[in-house]
């Protein structure tokens, strides 16, 4: 299948690439294409190619190229999907003149607040970005420091426990996926050719969870003088499946959970004073000794800012009136002001008070629900599966995979018969029905996006040993982010350097370009002797699907292998054998040796060869032999003392079967003739023709097949 490489409205080239489309939930969306052409292509940044309705772009790096001859140029192009356009845009906030120029800021908002700002940034130099379905979430205060819009999507998703996905240029922030009416299992006509269970580091098994909330608004005498919110009842933990998997403990602090009331301003008196007519308790009766009660605005012009209540008249219970004082932490401007102040409808939360018992009970119940949700995702061992799909069955059923959907997955040997989620896939660009799927039961997904968040926010924690160039520094940041993103893949992730011996030791070494790692060496044993040790052409999280990989037991997988590289008289020679998915191709000039290429048994008595060999013809002259099949085994092997068959040709199973079609003369024993015995079959019986000088002189019955 051919594709157009376009630059704007112009067609740069028409190519027939090989390679996969790869997509993952909240992660990669790539076309990794190998393109071979006779004439070079002047690829440029922002060149585009369309695949299955989506536009993929060559971003921020030109493709590597190998010139293998004057008529053969090979490119490895990584075209990136729409999400990567956001990695070109800085996430900035508005300044005093309403221009987006502030890169270091803190913002209070819900998921929609942060997405609105992201879309405004994306449309500064690009266009067409819009907001799709955004889940309603609570308000949170998030810091940003020199980050780009793509990793911000991951920050929002992880902060509010939702998923992002992009449709064209429409950004959604909600979990997608429905149960498709599809059943996959191993076997012909059932959808799957192979099934592999793979280790996932996205989530760890937990059977006993100690859960705590925040220290905010907790009474001094709360539950044995605990400074943190606890679960309801007397038990400090919840548990599940300890009878099946034993006790596997974890402690989690849910800092966003504490006794609180989300108040709403119902009327304004002045910029310092407002009324909340619905408040159901007297704030003055809940004050802590020596501590000022405070208001944190959740929405409005003052969202994210904290204000103390006035020492005198901070709250008037009779009128439900609050009075705040000037924010003491803000140095750049005075708040509240005539321009920036509370307004009717603004939401707020009170902190540094003793909340009434009913709010403590509500907070404990909230903590219980969050803890149970956390445990439910971890109470069984995490499982993920890589399955190679049957392209003929997919084509017959016209199956199109939708990322995030659920399909019924049956495998009795693994005890599986359940709806399981598609979290990633690769698809052959030359056969849209040729899929490899990544399926997961657990609903926690480690992604490139999470790695990018780690890289953008935590790079200050990275310590480099010795001298480094900018390139080495950037590669180190990426390797660290990837290692942390896949979360505790091994205890051997530390790097040790023995300068005296010249040894650098590490559990995993990754290299790449920009935000993507695309090759590596790893000592992580996650599949026994089938664990990948070397890989290229995929990120670490997809190393088991890399187009080139070497396993622990020595197996090597490659989509293409070239053999026979060398040099002669200063000329770089092309590969003698080019092993591709379409067959083994020998260069027209050079094979494994210049004039001849062969496959030969160790005894030298059996040989298949092709190339150039001049054979004399009796009576003078010679001909060029391009192929040879030799069997001399009976000369040395006592098990075969009577008969050698060098060529056996058979055709069967069709209405008309032709085993051998000869165009041109046949030379036997150096003479141009046809002589010999030729066997054929009729039904289940065997016969032979006796041919002399091209004429049939006899026909014999041999016997049954």
Image (cartoon, rainbow, N blue to C red):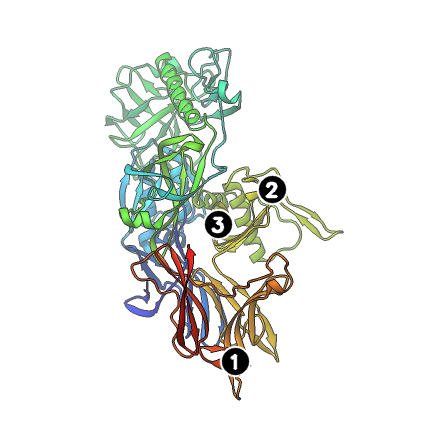
Residue labelled with disc 3: 539
Q: How many marks?
A: 3
Q: Residues within 10 Å of mark 3 (few under 14, many from 20)?
A: many
Instruction: Name the element at disc 2.
Output: loop
Task: Say if 615 sits above or below 362 in the image.
Answer: below
> Disc 1 marks which residue?
670
Which callout, 2 or 3, points to the residue nearer the camera? 3
Residue 405 vs residue 276, the one in the foreground: 405
Which residue occupies 32% across, 32% down? Answer: 137
The answer for how far apart the CA atoms under marks 1 and 2 are is 68 Å
Comes first in the chain, label 2 or label 3:
2
Label 2 – label 3 distance at C-alpha: 17 Å
Instruction: Give 644 or 335, whichever is nearer the viewer.
Output: 644
Name the quarter where the C terminus is drawn.
bottom left
Q: Is residue 315 above or below residue 150?
A: above
Mark 1 neighbour class, 10 Å CA radius: few under 14, some 14 to 19, many 20 or more: few
Given contact means CB atoms under 8 Å apart, are the residues at marks 1 and 3 in contact?
A: no
| Depth check, front residue: 701 or 562 | 701
Q: CA distance from mark 1 to mark 3?
A: 58 Å
Q: Which mark is residue 493?
A: 2
Lateral position of residue 145 relative to residue 491, left or right: left
Q: Residue at x 28, y 18 (%)?
A: 279
Image coordinates of residue 556 in percent, x first then y, are 55, 53
């Amino acid at each position: 299948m051919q594709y157009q490489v376009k630059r704007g409205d112009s067609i740069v080239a028409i190519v027939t690439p090989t390679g996969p489309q790869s997509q993952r939930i909240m992660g990669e969306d790539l076309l990794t294409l190998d393109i071979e052409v006779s004439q070079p292509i002047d690829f440029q940044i922002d060149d585009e190619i369309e695949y299955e309705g989506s536009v993929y772009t060559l971003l921020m790096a030109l493709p590597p190229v190998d010139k293998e001859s004057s008529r053969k140029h090979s490119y490895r192009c990584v075209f990136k999907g729409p999400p990567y356009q956001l990695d070109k845009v800085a996430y900035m906030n508005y300044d005093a003149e309403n221009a987006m120029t502030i890169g270091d800021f803190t913002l209070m908002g819900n998921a929609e607040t942060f997405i609105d700002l992201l879309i405004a940034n994306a449309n500064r130099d690009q266009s067409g970005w819009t907001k799709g379905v955004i889940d309603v979430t609570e308000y949170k205060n998030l810091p940003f420091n020199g980050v780009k819009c793509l990793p911000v999507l991951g920050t929002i998703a992880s902060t509010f426990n939702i998923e992002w996905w992009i449709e064209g240029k429409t950004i959604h922030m909600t979990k997608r996926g429905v149960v498709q009416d599809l059943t996959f299992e191993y076997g012909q006509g059932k959808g799957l050719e192979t099934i592999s269970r793979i280790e996932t580091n996205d989530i760890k098994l937990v059977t006993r969870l100690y859960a705590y909330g925040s220290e905010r608004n907790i009474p001094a005498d709360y539950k044995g003088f605990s400074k943190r919110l606890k679960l309801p009842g007397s038990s400090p933990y919840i548990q599940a499946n300890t009878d099946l998997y034993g006790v596997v403990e974890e402690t989690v602090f849910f800092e966003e959970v504490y006794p609180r009331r989300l108040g709403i301003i119902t009327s304004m008196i002045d910029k310092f004073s407002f009324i909340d007519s619905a408040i159901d308790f007297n704030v003055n009766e809940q004050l802590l000794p020596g501590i000022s009660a405070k208001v944190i605005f959740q929405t409005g012009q003052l969202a994210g800012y904290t204000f103390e209540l006035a020492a005198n008249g901070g709250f008037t219970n009779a009128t439900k009136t609050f009075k705040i004082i000037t924010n003491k932490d803000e140095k750049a401007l005075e708040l509240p002001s005539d321009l920036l102040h509370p307004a009717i409808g603004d939401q707020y939360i009170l902190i540094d008070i003793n909340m009434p018992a009913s709010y403590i009970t509500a907070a404990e119940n909230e903590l219980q629900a969050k803890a149970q949700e956390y445990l439910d995702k971890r109470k069984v061992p995490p499982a993920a599966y890589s399955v190679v799909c049957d392209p003929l069955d997919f084509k017959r059923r016209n199956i199109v995979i939708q990322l995030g959907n659920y399909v019924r997955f049956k495998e009795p040997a693994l005890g599986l018969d359940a709806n399981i989620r598609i979290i990633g896939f690769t698809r052959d660009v030359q056969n849209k029905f040729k899929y490899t799927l990544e399926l997961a039961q657990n609903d926690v997904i480690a992604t490139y996006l999470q790695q990018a968040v780690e890289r953008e926010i935590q790079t200050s924690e990275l310590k480099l040993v010795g001298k480094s160039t900018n390139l080495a520094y950037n590669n180190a940041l990426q390797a660290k982010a990837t290692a942390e993103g896949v979360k505790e893949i091994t205890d051997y992730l530390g790097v040790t350097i023995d300068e005296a011996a010249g040894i650098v030791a590490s559990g995993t070494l990754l290299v790449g370009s920009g935000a993507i790692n695309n090759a590596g060496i790893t000592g992580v044993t996650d599949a026994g002797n089938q664990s990948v040790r070397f890989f290229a052409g995929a990120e670490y999280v997809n190393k088991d699907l890399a187009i080139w990989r070497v396993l622990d037991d020595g197996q090597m997988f490659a989509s293409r292998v070239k053999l026979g590289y060398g040099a002669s008289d200063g000329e770089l020679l092309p590969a003698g054998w080019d092993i591709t998915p379409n067959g083994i191709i020998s260069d027209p000039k050079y094979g494994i040796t210049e004039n001849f290429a062969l496959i030969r048994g160790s005894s030298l008595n059996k040989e298949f060869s092709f190339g150039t060999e001049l054979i004399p013809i009796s009576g003078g002259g010679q001909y060029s032999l391009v192929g040879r099949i030799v069997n001399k085994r009976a000369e040395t092997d006592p098990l075969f003392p009577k008969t050698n068959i060098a060529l056996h040709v058979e055709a069967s199973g069709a209405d008309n079967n032709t085993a051998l079609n000869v165009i041109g003369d046949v030379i036997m024993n150096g003479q141009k003739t046809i002589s010999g015995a030729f066997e054929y079959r009729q039904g289940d019986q065997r016969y032979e023709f006796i041919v002399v000088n091209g004429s049939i002189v006899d026909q014999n019955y041999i016997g049954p097949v």
